[in-house]
Image: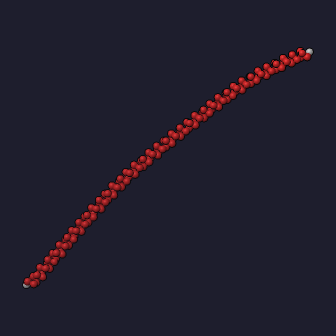
């Protein structure tokens, strides 16, 4: 009987071994499919995160470029306005200077005229005195 039991035990062991091997193959296949599925989903998530990150970086660069363009435009306008204001100030200073020069010329001409008139009067007075004194000596 022992041979029958041995054969039965051997058949049982073989059946158990086959069942175990089949179960292991199924578990491996299931685990491989689960691993593949999880790996694919995580790779897709990583790709999506990279794409989001690159999109955010591109958007930030665009925003910074726009801000830089706006700042440059404002600065250009400010410089242009300042140049216009400076040009107006220079023109006003030139006009003011020309007015002052003209005023000084008029003042100096009046002074020269007054001096000439005063000199003529002095000469006329001296001439009158000379004629008076001369007529005293002649008479």
- Specify the quadrant of the image occupied by residue 53: top right
Of all residues, the one furthest to the right in this rendering is 1
Is 22 positioned to the left or the right of 60 in the image? right
- The colour scheme used here is secondary structure
Above or below, comparing residue 1 to residue 89 in the picture? above
Residue sitting at x 14%, y 77%: 127
Say above or below: 16 vs 115: above
Task: Locate the N terminus and report the quarter of the image it occupies.
Answer: top right
Outermost residue, front side: 3
When the figure is inspected, residue 103 is found, relative to residue 80, above or below; the finding is below
The quadrant in which residue 101 appears is bottom left
Q: Between residues 52 and 31, which one lies in front from this camera angle?
A: 31
User: Taking 26 as reference, is 9 left or right?
Assistant: right
In the picture provided, is 126 more to the left or to the right than 40?
left
Query: Is 86 situated left or right of 31 in this image?
Result: left
Residue 50 position in % (x across, y down): 59, 35
Q: Where does residue 55 sit, x and y in percent of width and height?
A: 55, 36
x and y, in percent, of residue 22 in the image? 76, 21
Residue 9, x across and y down, in percent: 86, 18
Q: Residue at x 57, y 34 (%)?
A: 51
Q: Between 50 and 128, which is closer to the camera in this rendering?
A: 50
Q: Quadrant of the C terminus?
A: bottom left
Query: What residue is drawn where x is 62% and y is 30%?
Result: 44
* Numbered label tally: 0
Residue 102, quarter of the rendered image: bottom left
């Amino acid at each position: 009987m022992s041979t029958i039991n041995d054969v039965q035990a051997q058949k049982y062991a073989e059946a158990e071994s086959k069942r175990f091997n089949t179960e292991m193959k199924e578990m491996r296949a299931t685990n491989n499919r689960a691993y593949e599925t999880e790996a694919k989903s995580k790779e897709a998530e990583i790709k999506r995160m990279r794409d989001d990150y690159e999109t955010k970086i591109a958007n930030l660069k665009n925003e910074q470029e726009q801000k830089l363009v706006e700042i440059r435009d404002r600065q250009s306008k400010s410089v242009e306005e300042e140049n216009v204001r400076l040009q107006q100030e220079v023109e006003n200073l030139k006009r003011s200077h020309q007015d002052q020069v003209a005023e000084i010329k008029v003042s100096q001409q009046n002074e020269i005229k007054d001096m000439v008139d005063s000199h003529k009067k002095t000469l006329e007075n001296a001439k009158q005195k000379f004629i008076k004194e001369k007529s005293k000596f002649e008479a």
